[in-house]
Structures are given as C-alpha cells and as structure tokens.
Image (cartoon, helix red, strand yellow):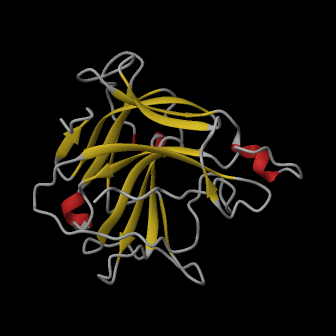
Amino acid sequence: MLALPLLVNACGTEPTSAPTRTQALEARFLAADPVLKLIPTAGNFAPPDFAKETGNGLYSQARWTNKVALDGKFSVLLQKSVDYASCYTSTPENGCAAFAAVIVSGVEGITIADLSTIGFSVNGTCGAGSPRFNLYYDTNGDGQADGVAFYGCAAHVSALPPAPDWTSMSASSDAPDFCYSFGPPIGTCTLDANSTVVQLSVIVDEKGTWYIDRVQAAGTTTGEPNGT
C-alpha cells in the first residue's frame, strides 16, 4: 500500500504544527523486522483559508538526488521557497503553508515500543522545527490517527557529526518534544508504548534547503531509493 500524502498546515497555532483534524490514514500490521522505504512528497495549503491541499507548484519540492549523499549514492532533497511567517500577515503569500517531506514507509501498524529509536542525518540547518519527525499514532486499534507527536532536529543532536556539513539526530519515539491527541477538542498527549504507528515522516515547512539521509526506525536504517 502506497503511503498517503502527509497533510501539514504551517499556519496552525504553531508555525510547524500539523492540522488538528484527524487524518483518515489506514494502518497496516507488519512483521517484526520491517523493510523501510523512503517516499518523497510535497504539497501546499493555499491562502486565504488554508483549508485544501493543492499541488506544491514552485513552493516546495521533495525528491531523490545524487548530488549530495552521506551513505551510498543518494539523499532526499527537501526544499521550500516561501517563509511560513507570511501566513500570519494580512496578505499571506501563496506557498507559506507549503511543505516537503519524506514518508518512512514500512513502520505502519507497529507499536511505539517496536518503533523504538528514530533518527536521521541532515545536510542543512538542524532546526527546532525543520527538519523534524511527525508521527501520527493510533491508540484504539482502528487504524486511524488519534494524535500526532513531534521530534525536532535541534533537541536531539548526536554528539559527533557523521561527516563534514552533516548533523545527525536520534530520539526515543516514546518521548516526543510535543504531542497532542485530536479532538474536538484537542487534548493532551495519549502516546504510549502500546500505541501503533499510522504514519512517520521527516518534514520541513520552513524556508530553506535540506538533504536527508540515513533514516533510522525500528532498528533499521535506510537512505537509498531501493530501501538499503
């Protein structure tokens, strides 16, 4: 099953917040040792109401590239050309709510305990909100997202850089920087070790350029188009 598009609205209550509505994402249950695959995706929520996802156009892009790589021959380019701060003005610029992401396919349906440590390496600014992991999770077994958790790059920087111009981050999936359950109304974080993964992604929704490689989840690391 192809991972569904990630829906992110940079003009929520936080500059890098996910939408507050429940995402109708179908989870699948996998073997104990998942095979990870990275799926680049990008999109945009157009002003003035930011209610409908449209094509990313010129505002953001997510794609494989062989121009920069930490391991192997490829990394995933994530890029956005419009600052999200424009969303908070009286005349928001189209593209301020655009996003670029790479979905980590292969972990859907496993528990947070089995997801364990998550991480990635980045060439570009390791910011508090971009890039970050977004984790949509299920708490009642119906396969739909009941909440979302965030793990920013800057808060989880590894002690030693893997190579010049690269930064690595690593976080325990059961200890997010911020987390909330979907409503209405929006509630406190309900993520625990028995929650299951609906969707995991590395995402940027601020202006800039990043290269993502060496993505880690569920004891597996990948960074190439074929999943190696």
Q: Is residue 192 left or right of residue 106?
A: right
Outermost residue to the right = 90
The front one of 122 and 102 is 102
Say if 30 sits above or below 204 in the image: below
Q: Is residue 215 left or right of residue 43?
A: left
The image quarter containing residue 216 is top left
Q: Is residue 222 left or right of residue 139?
A: left
Say if 182 sits above or below 131 in the image: below
The image quarter containing residue 38 is top left
Q: Quadrant of the N terminus?
A: bottom left
At 34% across and 35% down in the image, what residue appears? 158
Image spot of residue 212 (x, y percent)? 39, 33
Q: Is residue 204 visible?
A: no
Say if 180 sits above or below 135 in the image: below
At 43% across and 33% down in the image, what residue appears? 63
Image spot of residue 175 (x, y percent)? 36, 60
Outermost residue to the left = 32
The front one of 184 and 188 is 184
Counting every numbered tag in the picture gives 0
The front one of 69 and 50 is 50
